[in-house]
Image (cartoon, helix red, strand yellow):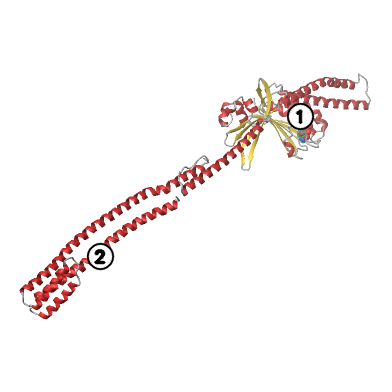
Amino acid sequence: MKLKTKITLGVMFLFTLLLLVGGTGFFYLNRSTSEQRDILKENYETLDYTKGMLEAMDNRDTDPEGKKAMFEQNMRGQESNITEPGEEYVTRKLRRDFNALQDHPGSLEHEKAVRNDISAIMQINLLAISEKNKMLNHSSDSAKFIITLLLTLCAIVGLVFVYNFPGYIANPIVTLTEGIKAIAGKKYSERIHLNRKDEFGEMAAAFNNMAEELDKFEHSNLARILFEKQRAEAVINSLQDASIGIGKNGTILFANPQALQLLNLPETAVIGKKEKLLREQNDLFRFLMTEESDQPFKIVVDTKEQFFTKETIPINNSEGTIGQMTVLKNITPYKELDVAKTNFMATVSHELKTPLAASDFSLKLLEDERVGPLNTEQKELVQNLKADNQRLLKILSELLDLSQVESGKIQLHIKEIDASVPVKRAVEAVTAAAQQKQVLIDTLLAHQPLLCKADEEKVAWVLTNLLTNAIKYSPAGSTVTVQVSRETDTMVISVTDRGKGIGHEHLARIFDRFYQVPGTEKTGTGLGLSISKEFIEAMGGKAWVESELGQGSRFYFSLPLA
Ligand code: ADP
């Protein structure tokens, strides 16, 4: 049955009960009123007539005609108001006795008979009143009983209704609300069991259908997401480079087998863990997360040294950065090739240096008059050959230094030195070239002791290189200044020239290997400054430059104080 029908029937039932109680009450009230009215009409009127007749009897001596008419009037009223059994007989007897009294006025016997008749009529009516009163009381009692019964029934039904009806309506709504909340919380397995065939039952069935559809949809979505996840994992796992992905909240999202092998950890100890925790447990992971330089580093894998570079790539989507991926590139094969190249360079440079030195010596002998006189053209040729030889020797020595730097085998003899010593040695070494270019070298040494910790040879080498450049790029007649000054915790040596200077865009790369400012005469190798920087850094110092195009350049390097 429909809920609507049930509610209508329930309300109708209560309404019927109400009508029944009201109707019954009205019926009994009406009945008792009419009974009372009947008593008044039937019996009390008779009493009135008998009273009138007695009055007429008592006073007939004073006004016989008037009282006779009065008696007659009451007699007729009584004759038309016969209601009780036996009343008719007594009334007829009264008429007879009254007529007899008229015929024999003054007869005491007839008067007595009349008075007795009147009294009998009164008696009959008084008795009837008393009887009717009893009956009235009785019917009012039974009315009370029936109305009370009906009211009790009404109250019981009403109470049962009040007790059950709100729950009957509200309970399914509460159940449905809970179901909707569960669905909102993505618990699509939630179902409602109402076991009813009304609108609530239909609603529960509709809800369960909806939940089932959502469940199916969720599962199909989940399957798709799982499939996509597996595909993404397959892609990551097939990457040759070790890769570790970290989410925005610091959780490790993925790490491919290569990465797990390097970290020497099982998948369960890495994926889904907080990177902060893993940093504390794993040295390599800590190094990867904290190291900022992009320099290659070494990891021993299966007792074999392997070289890697690290790259950190942000993971972006439409909402912005959602994490980062750290990729470790195994550069061991390149490193091995590089080492082979460095060894080859060192060997070739070393092997070439000896014949070149010998040919230099032979050229010196050729210049000697004792060997034989040379004409002017021959002398010029020998000079040119010597200059080329010198250049070749310089290049070879730079290549040898580079191979030392590259192989990490810079031989340093660091000790406490006076900075003015290598400065003087370098200035001496370039004096001839300066004179030739008509460049003046000015040396400014601070007055305090210039003690620092460095390799004298290497400092002189760097300074010679800087001075050679300064002279090379200075115009004739200008001055190159070498300055040594003591800062708070370092010794700073600078070489300043008033030459063509270096453009801003080249300053960042000037210390790179083989870098030459475009347009520079290709006499050098572009290695001098980079080797100088490596030497200075190996000694614990720093090298830098300040330059303005057309204003000259100032190269600095610092050394730790002794
Ligand atoms: P090389 O002098 O052998 O080319 P360097 O490493 O010493 O190599 O110098 C690299 C480049 O820097 C030079 O080719 C030159 O273009 C620029 N450079 C070096 N010193 C100076 C200087 N004092 N003034 C202007 N340019 C310079």
| Among the two numbered marks 2 and 1 on one chain, the one whose residue lies closer to the N terminus | 2
Looking at the rendering, the quadrant in which ligand 1 lies is top right
Position of residue 403 measured from the top left corner of the image (x, y, whole percent)? 75, 24
**CB atoms at circles 2 and 1 under 8 Å apart?**
no
Rendered view: 385 above or below 58: above
Crowding at dot 1, Cα within 10 Å, few <14 / some 14-19 / many 20+, comes out as: many
Residue 330 shown left or right of residue 156 in the figure: right
Dividing the picture into quarters, in which one does residue 369 lie? top right
Rendered view: 39 above or below 329: below
Front one among 394 and 491: 394
Position of residue 455 measured from the top left corner of the image (x, y, whole percent)? 70, 23
Rendered view: 48 above or below 19: below
Residue occupying the far top of the picture: 370
Residue 34 got which mark? Answer: 2
Asked if ligand 1 lies within 8 A of label 1, the reply is yes
What residue would you read off at disc 1? 528
| Secondary structure state at the residue bearing disc 1 | helix
Residue 136 shown left or right of residue 487 in the figure: left
